[in-house]
Amino acid sequence: MALQSGEKLPMFIGHIWSKQKSRWTLLGLRLLAFLAAAAATLVMVLNKQTKTFVVATIGTTPVNLTLTAKFHHTPAFVFFAIANGLVSIHNLVMIMMDLLGSKFDYKGFQFPMIASLDMLNLALVSGGANAAAFMAELGKNGNSHARWDKICDKFGAYCDRGAGALIASFLALALMLLISFLSILNHKLVNSSSHNSHNNIIALPN
């Protein structure tokens, strides 16, 4: 077997370089997604605020009531924390698999497995972020029709930290969407380029 022409070698080198660049790009995006999801999880789990309110006055003695707002008081926030925690673990595992993947033989199942897990975690973080966003809007503005009072005017710091967690989670969602798209696109391009390179660079002698 021989090279057909000297022009094919730069194409082959360019293909290898493009593959490596795509790999490191995806690794960088996964690292950012891991950090965003982990930050969202930690901020939400550690989010609580305690305030004391005067609810009545007996003579000149005020009657105080101490309330604490915690994330686990709202099931949507619990789901949010679990979802983002799982997404952060997923991206950490994917990073380790990419760095150590050459030591394992996946028998062609690596891409379908990773693509399926990426889409699953994309749906998971989307559900968690949107459920928490709905409850956050309810806490900020209340619902006059259901006679649910807003709480963010009383627990401002709690709501501010919750908003920060939401921003981090939606950033993780956008990154997971981009990762899924680039991963599928890169897989198709690599397969196409590999097939073309094999046909164009290597030629059987007559």
Image (cartoon, rainbow, N blue to C red):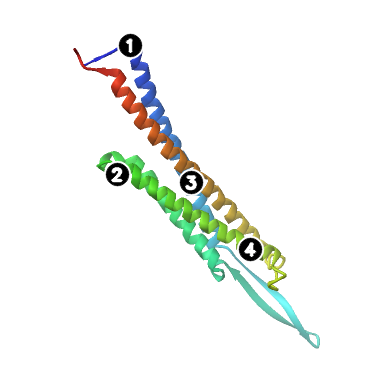
Circle number at residue 109: 2
Callout 2 secondary element: loop
Q: In the image shown, does 26 or 187 lie closer to the viewer?
A: 187
Q: In terms of secondary structure, where does tag 3 sit?
A: helix
Q: Residue furthest bottom?
A: 59
Marks 3 and 1, how far apart in space? 41 Å
From what the image shows, is residue 202 above or below residue 44? Answer: above
**Rendered residue at 43%/52% (across/down):** 120
- Of residues 25 and 52, the one nearer the viewer is 25
Residues tagged 4 and 2 counted as in contact (Cβ below 8 A): no
Q: Which residue is mark 4?
A: 158
Q: Earlier in the sequence, mark 4 or mark 2?
A: 2
Which of disc 1 and disc 4 is earlier in sequence? 1
Q: Residue at label 3? A: 176
User: Where residue 105 sits: x, y (%)?
Assistant: 24, 42
Q: Are circles 3 and 2 on residues that touch, CB within 8 Å? A: no
Q: Which mark is residue 6?
A: 1
Secondary structure of residue under mark 1: loop
Could you give the CA–CA distance between mark 4 and mark 2, rounded to whole angstroms?
44 Å
